[in-house]
Amino acid sequence: MVRKPIVAGTFYPASSDVLRGRIESMVDKKAHPEKMLGAVSPHAGYQFSGVVACEVFSKANITDTVIMLGPNHTGIGKPFALYAEGNWRTPFGDISVDQELSAALLKKSNLIEEDMTAHAGEHSLEVQLPIMQYFKPGFKIVPIVIGTAELKKCMEAAEAIAAVIKESGKDVLIVASSDMTHYESQDDAKKKDKIAIDAILRLDENLLLKNVGKYNITMCGYIPTVIMIAAVKALGATAARLVRYQTSGDITGDYSQVVGYAGIIVE
């Protein structure tokens, strides 16, 4: 089974040569890869958020297996939908699903279910992959898209992910795919996004979940980020830092209705 790209040619170039050139124009060439347990990376078109995503992965020592957590924008499929086997295709070639780790997750968790339909029209994980391939060809993925869920279920999923990683003995990076505030003024977006980012930097998944609701922060991947934070803390994470924040307005010059993008790494 091959999951074919759905936003190649729109969110990022469909030609491998053009895509490589686009990524090379955005990467931080002075960055040194470092070990990290988790990351938050945006998933908009590369012209808007590519620089932020590239800065994250410029600094990442991408592991042989990466667990990808993304929001389910379409509403199709299971609440915790795992693409458990096969390959994901990008202009740079196919990426294999880590079937061993996926099978272990399905066995460990009653929440996480095998469901390819949830991934068919979802872009949030796909957009990350070519940038990661640029830095590390040949890695495997465990792709999961998640609908909204209460804290208890988030914690159950995080516990299962952390347990499976520990039992595998592998070094595994967990990437939460998320954009920040959507379609508000530059000033309002920056204020709201700072509240969400501060909670992430404190590694406080409870505060993030609370503040998203309290301040009506339209961060599409807040649930994947909550799960990532809880999982990496169980794996020993103690610190997070913001590597870059910008909005679509910084690219277009239109600050009336922007989308925010944050790149965060967790160690």
Image: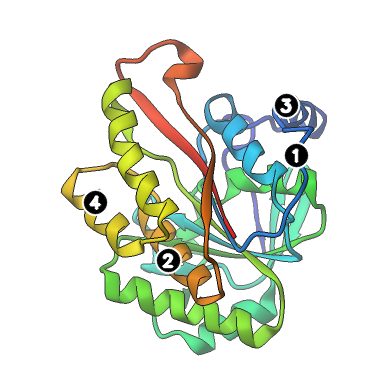
**Percent of width and height locating residue 175:** 56, 57
Of callouts 4 and 3, the N-terminal one: 3
| Relative horizontal placement of residue 259, taking residue 127 as reference (left or right) | left
- Which quadrant, please, contains the C terminus? bottom right
| Residue 78 sits above or below residue 69 on the image | below
Residue ID at (78%, 46%): 135
Q: Which secondary structure, mark 1?
A: loop
Residue beneath disc 2 = 227
Number of other residues with Cα within 10 Å of mark 1, as a class: few under 14, some 14 to 19, many 20 or more = few
- The residue under label 1 is 31
The residue type indicated by label 1 comes to: Ala
Gap between marks 1 and 2, in whole Å?
Answer: 27 Å
Q: Earlier in the sequence, mark 2 or mark 3?
A: 3
Quarter of the image that includes the N terminus: bottom right
Secondary structure beneath dot 2 equals helix
Image coordinates of residue 177 in percent, x first then y, are 50, 50
Q: CA distance from mark 2 to mark 3?
A: 31 Å
The three-letter code of the residue at mark 4 reads Asn
Which residue carries the number 4 mark?
Answer: 211
Vertical placement of residue 83 versus 93, above or below: below
Numbered disc in front, either 1 or 2: 1
The numbered mark, 3 or 1, whose residue comes first in the sequence reads 3
Q: Earlier in the sequence, mark 4 or mark 2?
A: 4
Identity of the residue drawn at 82% across and 53% down: 137
Residue bearing mark 3: 22
40 and 32: which is toward the camera: 32
Q: Give how far across and how far down residue 154 sits, in percent.
A: 35, 71
Query: For the residue labelled by badge 3, is the local secondary structure a helix, a strand or a loop?
Result: helix
**Callout 4–callout 3 Cβ contact below 8 Å:** no
Give residue 242's position: percent from left, percent from top: 51, 43
